[in-house]
Amino acid sequence: MNTTIMHGSRVLRTMTTDLAEAYRGGSTVERGCYQLAAVLVLSGLVHLGVLMVTGGPWTGPLSWRKPATFGLSFGLTLATLTWVLSFVPMRGVTRSRLLAVFGAACAVEVAGITVQAWRRVPSHFTPPADATAVDAVAAVAAASGAVAIVGVITAATVKTLRHHEEVPPSMRLALRVGFLSLMVALAIGVLMMARGAVLTRVQGDVAQAFAFSAALKPGHAATMHGVLVLPALAWLLRYAERPERFRTNAVRLATAGYGAFATTIVLDPLLNSALPSALAVAGTLTLTAAAALTVHAIATPPTHPG
């Protein structure tokens, strides 16, 4: 037992040191992105506090939930992208440019949502007849930020799909599936905005626009954070004194679980049966099993033949 505790403490200290070094050893842009991510997360937490204090509705176009979730989600995504791109071989100047554009776009998106929330007007799907000059500026800024985000994620995905011999197979698989999952999230987000804009501007049906968007939000959220979950698992497996084949199989197991769960959530609005729920549970259990296997492998001291 003492040997296991001592081993676990050493591994934990090593992880902490490596994470701190990843920040200190990063470029100026990378450190700036981490700092901006912290600000966005703080903004999300502040607005979550506003929601709790005011007791306003959790749903609806004027809910304080929007600046809260956007701040938390964009902050986490910016920190995630900054971290995982450090595992993708590319020129330093290319990485810095991608992150600078992505960070600026995240800031613009969250700022636009936040300003509209404090103005107590909808941040999306405003009828043209009711839109003010500020609403028009916010809409253009949001659209520009969305285009930049799609461009950066697409470019990063293309780079992860290339074969990099220096990247271990386990991390290579995690990065590829994670970024492809993020691309699905972007596609859902674009569909939400495009269809919502048509319903609002062409048909004048704001309620239907928000209803359509709400139906797709779970799938958008479920696919967005695979780019963190899977690479994080692959990174943790680096501290398990196991062969690369073991690590790759563990990532494959996690990929299967995450894929089943996310696919179920995405397709749920289209399916009317008990199968999606069962598949989601199976995916969650599989992902949990992969996480438990990883923790056990890390915590177990290596055995050496005597």
Image (spheres, rainbow, N blue to C red):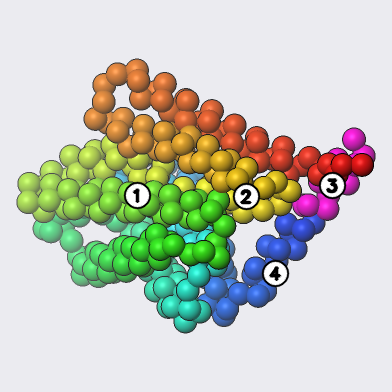
- Under mark 3, the amino acid is His
Which residue has dot 2 on it?
244
Q: How far apart in space, not on screen, are marks 3 and 2 (Cα)?
A: 20 Å
Which label lies toward us, 2 or 1? 2
- Magenta stretch bounds: 1-12
Q: Position of residue 233 (x, y in %)?
A: 59, 47
- Under mark 1, the amino acid is Ala
Is tag 2's residue or tag 4's residue first in the polypeptide sequence? 4
Q: Crowding at label 3, few (<14), some or many (≥20) Cα neighbours within 10 Å?
A: some
Which label lies toward us, 2 or 4? 2
Give the SS element for disc 2: helix
To which quarter of the image does residue 166 belong?
bottom right
Residues at discs 1 and 4 in contact (Cβ within 8 Å): no
Residue name at image x 48 percent, y 51 percent: 173
Residue 299 seen in this snapshot? yes
- Under mark 2, the amino acid is Glu
Residue 185 image label: 1
Q: How far apart in space, not on screen, are marks 3 and 1 (Cα)?
A: 39 Å
Give the SS element for disc 3: helix
Decide which of 168, 115 is in the foreground and name it.
168
Which residue has dot 3 on it?
7
| For residue 137, side relative to residue 244 (left or right) | left
Q: Give the vertical position of 30 relative to 76 (above or below).
A: below
Which label lies toward us, 3 or 2? 2
Give the SS element for disc 4: helix
Which residue has dot 4 on it?
21
